[in-house]
Amino acid sequence: MAFPFLKKNTAQEETGLPEILPKHVAFIMDGNGRWAKKRGMPRKFGHREGAKTFHDITRYCRSIGIQNASFYVFSTENWRRPEEEVDAIMNLLWEYLNDCDEYLEQEVRMIFIGDKSRLPERIRNRMLELEEDSKKYDKMNLILAINYGGRDEITQAARQLAEKAARGEIRPEEITEDTISQHLYTREIPDVDLMIRPSGELRLSNFLIWQCAYAEYYFTDVLWPDFARSELDKALRDFAGRGRRFGGV
Ligand code: IPE
Ligand code: IPE
Ligand code: MG
């Protein structure tokens, strides 16, 4: 039954989206290479097209009121790709980081998760700048995972806690699930409610492994460059029909 005091916003009315939306949606932007290959084009064209999809889906998330949207941009494992492809992705990233005014105008807070230290300096500095310039905004958190790995994230949290223990700042018995969460890159972000992976692969590929402990998963064969707003609508409707029990009955 609909509760009259739960007012939908206009975008929700137009699309007929469910009233209960996930607080945190995560996207594994996969399938760019195959999208390009199908068209006889080099893989980097797929990445360019995928970046357009990212832009569109981010705008859509903002307009329908998703509070936290995470996107897997580049994993700690993606350095294994040919240098030419890694360079093309970094150049594209640089272009995009210089084209974020719209998000700031829309009062979107940008948070970059992952190990920034291995990234080219100009990219790292731009990321820090955008984080600083947008930290006052609260309309939506846009979380971009760049040189991100879930195991890497947990490892650095363990290391920080061990250092604190060695300095006598924390006792081992004081370490709880909460303490660990507070040492992850996502410390200010709630756990993932809905994890979406296009491109037909049925795996997490090291994305937000701690934060997905109770996430709902949505897989589709659509390749990321073809992932339209209507695909997200489908995932959101599917999510609204799931029974989440968190171990209870
Ligand atoms: C995802 O698309 C983008 C990145 C990993 C940077 P892929 O490049 O993995 O595309 P496929 O999986 O080869 O089609
Ligand atoms: C996951 O896609 C990483 C990103 C989308 C950034 P991959 O294409 O790297 O994942 P695998 O290798 O198929 O697991
Ligand atoms: Mg892939």
Image (cartoon, rainbow, N blue to C red):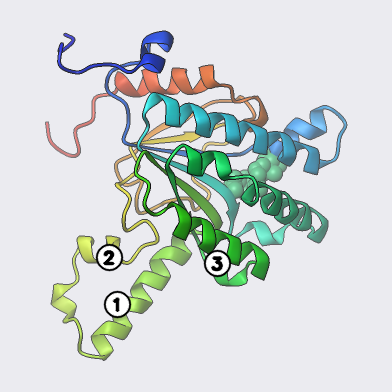
Q: First in sequence, mark 2 or 1: give its number.
A: 1
Residue lying farthest right? 40
Compared with 242, 23 (above or below) is: below
x and y percentages locating residue 242 in the rendered image: 29, 23
Query: Can I make out residue 13 in this image?
Result: yes
Mark 3, mark 2: which one is toward the viewer?
A: 3
Left or right side of 56 for 186: left
Q: First in sequence, mark 3 or 1: give its number.
A: 3
Q: Nearer the viewer, residue 52 or 35?
A: 52
Amino acid bearing label 1: Leu
- Verify CB contact (< 8 Å) between mark 3 and mark 2: no
- Verify CB contact (< 8 Å) between mark 2 and mark 1: yes
Disc 2: which residue: 180
x and y percentages locating residue 172 in the rendered image: 18, 79
In which quadrant of the rendered view does residue 241 lie?
top left
Task: Please identify the quadrant where the N terminus is shown.
Answer: top left
Disc 3: which residue: 116
Left or right side of 116 for 184: left
Q: First in sequence, mark 3 or 2: give its number.
A: 3
Using the numbered discs, state the Cα–Cα distance from disc 3 to disc 2 in whole angstroms: 20 Å
> Please, what secondary structure does the residue beneath circle 3 have?
helix
Residue displayed at 44% across by 31% down:
62
- Verify CB contact (< 8 Å) between mark 3 and mark 1: no
Compared with 31, 9 (above or below) is: above
In which quadrant of the rendered view does residue 9 lie?
top left
**Category of crowding for the residue at label 1, using alpha-carbon neighbours closer than 10 angstroms: few (below 14), some (14–19), many (at least 20):** many
Disc 1: which residue: 161
